[in-house]
Image (tube, rainbow, N blue to C red):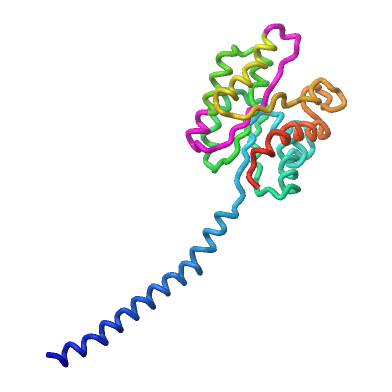
Amino acid sequence: MHTHKRNREPNTASSIVQIVKHFRLLISLFFIVLAPALAFAADKPANILFFGDSLTAGYGLDDPTTQAFPGVIQQKLADSGLSYRVINAGLSGETSSGGIRRIDWILRQPVSVFVLELGGNDGLRGLPLDLLRDNLQNIIARVRAKNPEVIVLVAGMQMPPSMGDYAPQFAAIFPRLAAGNDATLIPHLLEGVGGIPRLNLPDGIHPSPTGHTIVAENVWTILKPLLKP
């Protein structure tokens, strides 16, 4: 009996050694196979989505990818060493209603920062302001439902004074929208550009490349402090 018990003890010790070896092997496989994948995911740049109309799309520019203000922002990010990727989801002629129809498809990709630039075409058409407000609110709500942690910026817009009382009421929508959604307001997207012929294309509405550089600075001043190094 004593001899049989002594024979089992080496077998038990051998089993423990084998378990430790297997455990060490699993740890090694983790670092060889999974760790690089996790590191890649961590290094993958976060997305900044610019969602707007022809102003965002860079209507009339020779190279909208680089000359429109989202493209200029991408260069500023690179120059600042900030690991973010700009997605330009601008569409010429887009309205707030069109934005609602399009936003779910756009949100198939992850978004960390969302810049809403819509309403100008609605305003020029005299859309009822309560409908415009509801449409923009709907878009923000869908973005937040997809990612509650998303940073939202709302681009302030203005209408020509010739539109009478509609103009100041239109402009007031954007700060209220930002305040009501814990979003950050870009007070006036076209500050220093709108109404200045030399900074716009011949149509007098869409910024030239130089105008887009100024628009980008208007956005960058507000955006940069919100970004993580």
Asked whether 44 or 94 is in front, the reply is 44
Label tally: 0
* Left or right placement of residue 19 versus residue 111 in this view: left
* Residue found 81% across the figure and 20% down from its top: 195
Q: Does the magenta stretch include residue 158?
A: yes
Return the x and y of residue 128 as percentages of the image width and height: 59, 12
* Residue found 65% across the figure and 16% down from its top: 172
Return the x and y of residue 179 as percentages of the image width and height: 58, 23
Relative to 25, residue 103 above or below: above
Q: Does the magenta stretch include residue 125?
A: no
The residues colored magenta run: 141-165
Return the x and y of residue 120 as percentages of the image width and height: 67, 21
Query: Toward which corner of the image does residue 96 lie, by quadrant?
Result: top right
* Residue found 46% across the figure and 67% down from its top: 30
Asked whether 164 or 201 is in front, the reply is 164
* Left or right placement of residue 58 versus residue 117 in this view: right
> For the view shown, which residue lies furthest in the bottom direction?
3
